[in-house]
Amino acid sequence: MSLRDLFEDVIDQDSAVAQLQKSSQNPVHAYLFVGPKGSCKWDAAKAFAALIMNQTNHDHSEERTKNLIRKGEHPDLISIEPTGNQYRDDDVQKIINEASRTPVEGAKKIIVANRFHTANETAVGRLLKTLEEPPESVIIILLSEIIPKNQITIASRCQQVQFNQISDSKMSDWLTQHVNDPQTIQLLTTAARGDIDRAKDLISDPNIAFRYELWKSTLEDLKPEGYAIATSVNEIQKAIDDAQEILAEKHDQEIKDLLDNEKQLGIKTGNRSQLEATHKREIRRFRTDELEFGFSIFTTMFQEQLRSNPDEGSLQAVNIIKKANGVMKRNANEKLLLTSLLISLSELN
């Protein structure tokens, strides 16, 4: 099994991969993977775990280990997600409890805590002791999009590995392996915005081109009248609602698979509520991604106008869109946000 094979799902992260390959020869007790959503942090964590397990446990099948880890099913690879919007005491306690247990099959257990940048201050404080005095058999990997101020001490206890947004060229190369049409590849690259997880979802989305044209025509035909803006907002929201159906079908199947598995085992795992919470987060993230996609289309249109015929209105428009993007990330009301943005842009015209 080659190193290249293990990290083949980690796209456009050469520096991070090289660092992890070197570190796997003498791994430390804790790592902090930092980078934007969809930058292959989870895939890198799985590959790193497989590499460590193959080097520390010689009495096992390397192919079996690799396959189980790729599917996230190896007993010594533990993935932990927060049950709500952020890590709280109970969520961090799961990490602490797992760290106190010995590995099932080999010499090392790898605990991966996803979205750790959401941890509140109390949760951070509770994990600090475990990071300072970890069991020798445990490696903890924290996956974060940023390093908040309340986690600077946590970061100092970990080896940091930086992940970057996937470049358009590498995203396009990856999409070429799954999509034949060059125009579709270009559109998906634009819509994914460096996020490989979003790109994977959009491959099976038949209406992404329709939504792209809808956003463009919304700006091109923008009128200041209230009824016109309300109509545009309703059309955009309906298009996002329709696109969300694909995600809803996937969620329904995941719930069905969970219930079927519980029926076969004859036990209630108690995982349904956590899965439903994950689904809610994925829906919020999907809608945010769709709005960011639309806002990026608006921005590109105004930037093109600035290049061809610079004017103060286009520059103001870019700043208005940037401000709306920031407001959106603070969980603003979607309908009000869109209405306010379109009103502001129409006033410039």
Image (spheres, rainbow, N blue to C red):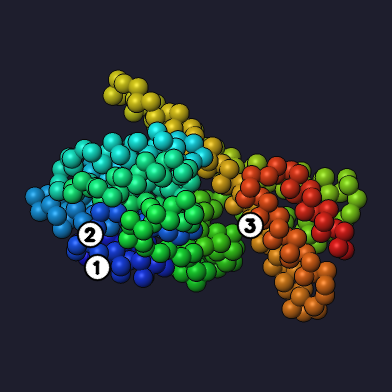
Seen from this angle, which residue lies furthest right? Answer: 225
Residue 27 marker: 2
Q: Quadrant of residue 83?
A: top left
Q: For this view, does 82 lie left or right of residue 188? A: left
Seen from this angle, which residue lies furthest top? Answer: 266
Q: Which residue, given by chain and number where applicable, does mark 3 sit on?
A: 293
Q: Could you tell me the amino acid type at mark 3? A: Phe
Seen from this angle, which residue lies furthest left? Answer: 59
Alpha-carbon distance for marks 2 and 1?
Answer: 9 Å
- State the residue at coordinates (82%, 75%): 311
Q: Quadrant of residue 96?
A: top left
With respect to residue 229, does 173 lie above or below? below
Numbered disc in front, either 3 or 1:
1
Q: Could you tell me the amino acid type at mark 1? A: Lys
Residue 182, horizontal then vertical, whole percent: 55, 68
Quarter of the figure with the C terminus: bottom right
Most foreground residue, 141 or 211 = 141
Alpha-carbon distance for marks 3 and 1?
Answer: 37 Å
- State the residue at coordinates (42%, 59%): 34
Q: For this view, does 260 lie left or right of residue 27? A: right
Alpha-carbon distance for marks 2 and 3?
Answer: 39 Å
Q: Could you tell me the amino acid type at mark 2? A: Pro
With respect to residue 308, does 184 lie above or below? above
In the rendered structure, are the residues bearing label 3 and label 1 in contact, judged by CB atoms less than 8 Å apart?
Answer: no
Q: For this view, does 144 lie left or right of residue 214? A: left
Quarter of the figure with the N terminus: bottom left
- State the residue at coordinates (66%, 50%): 328
Q: Which residue, given by chain and number where applicable, does mark 1 sit on?
A: 22
Residue 210, horizontal then vertical, whole percent: 67, 54
